[in-house]
Amino acid sequence: MPLVTTTEMFKKAYDGGYAVGAFNVNNMEIVQGITEAAREQHAPLILQVSKGARAYANHTYLVKLVEAAAIECPDIPIALHLDHGPDFETCKSCIDGGFTSVMIDASSKPFEENIAITRKVVEYAHDHGVVVEAELGSLAGVEDEVNVSAEDSSYTRPEEVEEFVSRTGCDSLAIAIGTSHGAYKFTAAQCTRNEQGVLVPPPLRFDILEEVSRRLPGFPIVLHGSSSVPQEYVKMINDNGGKMPDAVGIPEEQLRKAATLSVCKINIDSDLRLAMTGSIRKYFADHPDHFDPRQYLTPARANIKAIVTHKLIDVLGCAGKA
């Protein structure tokens, strides 16, 4: 099956009460681990590439890796998406270069400027059969080129969404309801501690999500910054020479709830990086004399596949929905 846009998969997700997983990719092993899980679970899939990933691995290599995944997984729909496109030129390059979906992130700009930039991308993308995700509201945290302080973050204003979607013509909308980029999503001051001393993040603003859904019935909503930061991999990293105190993510039960509402796409990034890094650190601790990348990347790929399988079944609810 050739690469597809997200239009049909979002319609099915909205009607079916589940979300499609959007996983950031940087290299072959990450692509393989994700797509092997999706193929076995017969789940629709979005593989997304950030500006940082394009700088690291090269646009052409990444596109060809995703095209190879589509060949290896002919029975599931796969979309290739630009994550956090910073400007028109980057979006245009990806549209011209084989992507089926792009995100223009002008959320840091004033409302009218966000509309103008987004509309320009939408017009070019739609002329080339590509769909566009936009963002309204600003998430805190750090992820590749995105770096927003907690002070500069802002929740999406539901009263703005109808005008924004109508004037831009965007196909999906990322909103800010309390998720955050990266593995360090919240400061200790923002969290409480449970009886075991583990940080508990503040709950997501489902009231905002529900009001946005009421104002945009049937329209696909996207959540960024939605990694759950699995503590077993944080522990694996710390037990093998790492230093990641107080890394905490979004509780999975809250993400599952969001997936039953209007959220059709949930971005997952840090979880995969933690799984890969923890696996490699542990492998070298157990095998200090090994040096072959095939040896230490094999368990890393297997752990990525395991965590994606869990997400598809238990968090996103999209297993068997391809």
Image (spheres, rainbow, N blue to C red):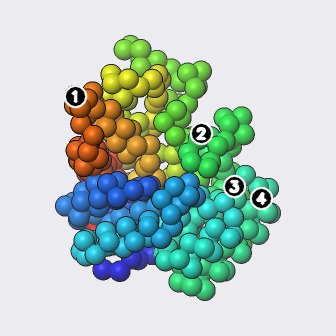
Q: Earlier in the sequence, mark 4 or mark 1?
A: 4
Q: Which residue is mark 3?
A: 107
Q: Where does the image place residue 257, in percent across and percent down from the top left?
A: 40, 47
Q: Could you tell me which secondary element the residue under label 1 belongs to? A: helix
Residue type at numbered disc 4:
Phe
Q: In the rendering, at what x and y percent does residue 246 appear?
A: 47, 23
Disc number lying in front (3 or 2): 2
- The residue carrying mark 2 is 141
Residue bearing the label numbered 4: 111
Report which quarter residue 41 is drawn in.
Answer: bottom left
User: In the image, what residue occupies the spot 61% across and 49% down?
Assistant: 145
Q: Quadrant of the N terminus?
A: bottom left
**Which SS class for mark 4?**
helix
Give the left or right position of residue 41, taking residue 12 as reference: left
Q: What separation in Å lies between label 4 and label 1 (alpha carbons)?
A: 53 Å
Assess whether mark 2 and mark 4 are in contact (beta carbons under 8 angstroms): no
| Residue 244 seen | yes
Viewer-side residue, 157 vs 241: 241
For the residue carrying disc 3, how many other residues have a C-alpha within 10 Å: few (<14), some (14-19), or many (20+)?
many
Q: Image quarter for residue 155?
A: top right
Residue found at the far left of this picture: 40
Mark 1 or mark 2, earlier in chain: 2
Q: Which residue is mark 1?
A: 286
Lower sequence index among marks 4 and 2: 4
